[in-house]
Image: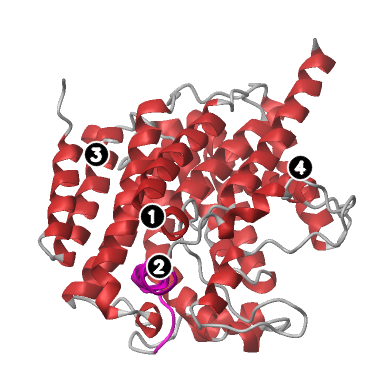
Amino acid sequence: MRLYVRHLFIVMLVGGYFFDYPLLQAVSLFLYSGAVLTEDTRAGTLRRLDVSTTFAFLLLLTSFSHFGALSGWFDTGDTWANYLIPEHLEKGLFVFSAGAVVSMEAMRYTMVSRGDYRIAYPRQSFFVSVLLVSLMLLVARHFGLLPSWGTVTSFVQLLVNGSIFLLAYMAHAENRMARIITVVVYSTGLSLYAIQFSYLRMEIIVPWLAYFMGEVVARRQILRIHLVSKTILVVGLVVFPVLFTYLGKNRESLRGSERKLELALKEGTGLPRDEEGETLLSRLNVMGQMSNIVDLTERKGFYEGFTLRYFSFVFIPRFIWPEKPILDGGQWFAVEIGRSYYLPSGRAANSVNMTVPGEMYLNFGWSGLIAGCTLFGFFVSFIWNSVRGSDLISWAFRFYLLFLGMFSLGSDMMVIPQLMAYWLIYKTVTFFRTRLYA
């Protein structure tokens, strides 16, 4: 049996827990995720790009944040430390790391990684058609012209950023400067639009993730990207971190402001490096909530599926059951650990994600963690493997899955009903489209 290098780092991870050395846990997870990425990008050539690849990138950044927080070698912000329970830090860190590794291994062994990213209609007009569809959807969303069909509408909105993934692929596959500039300009517009109108800061970077993924898939090279792309990457690495911190610190005061974009670009890019605010690395740090997961189980025992009870009714449409409870496990968790409270409206003032490993451990302990994270990895593989199309809808859904792996795959178990709903919509659309053109 071939022994993968990443398996050695799993042994190190377990050793870090049993020898009471949390820093070794952080280093081990960092090396493990780095080994996965190395397998997929050997010698600078893209050999594999699926959800497990982007999830490895998420684990790389998260473990890097943990290393910085534990070692003190660099500043990762202190937001996570505000609700850290120090005596449970080590066990909480291992719960997260072990669950993440189990999910990753399940995905690596069952996920079919297709390198044949193709387009359905290689005609010259297809590029323009995709761009126009994306622009029309953006305008319709901005002016509230899209019908309020809940999950269906949100799935349709995926086509806006998903189109960047496809457009960037077409532009760089043909290496046509005019098309590359067109996609760059459109991505810039979407990013600026997100600064002005979006409450979530991550929306600012999503178009650029789609752009760079599309280019890498087209060129099959990690380092040999276009000069225009290199320039954008350098500028982004300088500007985005300070914008992220500024917008996080001034989130409420800027909400609804007509000058939000102007103030963000003017004040945000001039933000002193030592000014307090939630940084990206601080946001990725999960040691605070994981220590609270362990604390809850120590004080109250395991919750025996309490936080998963919504699976009994989550797929009932709200138009059938208007009073269906609002699904937000993060709000419940924030209140449960004493970091939030319920407003008169019934919603909590804050939300804290439990992570998939944390929620499984909170409910069922170690056995639930192993079984749950394994099944979770299988489920994600099933969704990814089912995306077989090469049209705009398939490209958009594929990008959504890649993005989910990179930033929010492990937020909590609520990702399962959301993914299942999107999958059902995707399969329904592709079924009727196939019958239509048959």
Residue 38 disc label? 3
CB atoms of marks 4 and 2 within 8 Å = no
Q: In the rendered structure, does residue 151 fall within the stretch colored magenta?
A: no
Q: Earlier in the sequence, mark 4 or mark 3?
A: 3
The residue that label 4 is drawn on is 132
How far apart in space, not on screen, are marks 4 and 2 (Cα)?
Answer: 52 Å
How far apart in space, not on screen, are marks 1 and 4 (Cα)?
Answer: 50 Å
The residue that label 2 is drawn on is 297
Residue 365 disc label? 1
Which residue is drawn at the image coordinates 32% and 40% (left, top)?
Answer: 224
Residue 96 relative to residue 189: left or right? left
How packed is label 2: few (under 14 Cα within 10 Å), some, or many (20 or more)? some
Whole-percent x and y of residue 82? 39, 85
How far apart in space, not on screen, are marks 4 and 3 (Cα)?
Answer: 37 Å
Q: Which residues are magenta?
A: 276-300
- Does residue 236 appear in this view? yes
